[in-house]
Amino acid sequence: MVLSEGKKVYFASDNHLGAPTPKESLPREKKFVAWLDAIKDDAAAIFLIGDLFDFWFEYKTVVPKGFTRTLGKLAEIVDSGIPVYYFVGNHDLWMNGYFEKELGIPVFFKPQDFTIGNASFFIGHGDGLGPGDKGYKRMKKVFTNPFFKWLFRWLHPDIGVKIAQYLSVKNKLISGDDDAKFLGEENEWLAIYSKKKLCEKHRDYFVFGHRHLPLEITLNEKSNYINLGDWIQYYTYGVFDGKVLELKKN
């Protein structure tokens, strides 16, 4: 990806729209949409790194109700020629073509390498990576199993969505509440994972979400791990100007 003079690339994650209730999340959604509107003038691209929604499941003919402001703004941005890239998180694993078809947004289910300007990036949501987190890793295998998804699709959406929304908030393995604590640089499992990936190939930046904590950790003299934080408590995002990736607060 080539950056023109004055253009920037933006990164955001973990909005969890719809949680704990649609009414309570609406002010956060409006704030996020206003941010999207503000950055579109100098954005070369926007990366959304997962958990935009607190729950998202695509039936063959139905998607969850709501989020009209966000989806409309994303469609407007893409239609204006600014690419948007989406990485699924642990709350929106069940995407199945809606974003690609309706919004023109490519969706990634695994971390990806990108070259932006002269910098190399490794980008992903971050769930299930690195050491530990065994309970969630087992749960993720169930949630991504085609048979499980087929069974869930047979539930009426009014029932299935209500059950999923309840579990999304109440189940600690799904909600990630137990993970939203700083563990110390030597124990941050996404930083450990990033260091291991550096043994395979150099990257300038490892960019993740999921932890709900804005973090910047130096991995070596040339590489950094960035966690984007969230749009629940911190309202932080990443911006790359072609030279440096920085965390900023909205």
Image (tube, helix red, strand yellow):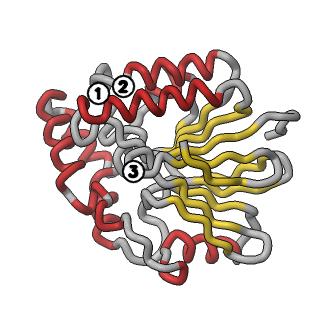
Q: Quadrant of the C terminus?
A: top right
The reply to whether dot 1 and dot 3 touch (C-beta < 8 Å) is no
Which percent across, then down, holds residue 118? 85, 52
Front residue of this view, candidates 165 and 229: 229
Q: Is residue 16 left or right of residue 244?
A: left
Question: Residue 233, which numbered label?
Answer: 3
Tell me which amino acid carries mark 2.
Phe
Q: CA distance from mark 3 to mark 2?
A: 19 Å
SS at badge 2: loop
Q: Closer to us: mark 3 or mark 2?
A: 3
Whether residue 112 is situated above or below residue 30 in the rendered picture: below
Q: Nearer the viewer, mark 2 or mark 1?
A: 2
Q: Crowding at label 2, few (<14), some or many (≥20) Cα neighbours within 10 Å?
A: some
Report which residue position mark 2 lands on. 67
Q: Amino acid at mark 1?
A: Pro
Q: Where residue 40 appears, x then y in whole percent?
A: 65, 26
Question: Around disc 3, counting alpha carbons within 10 Å, would you say few (fewer than 14), some (14 to 19), or many (20 or more)?
Answer: few
Q: Secondary structure at mark 3?
A: loop
Q: Residues within 10 Å of mark 1 (few under 14, many from 20)?
A: some
Q: Residue furthest left?
A: 159
Q: CA distance from mark 1 to mark 3?
A: 24 Å
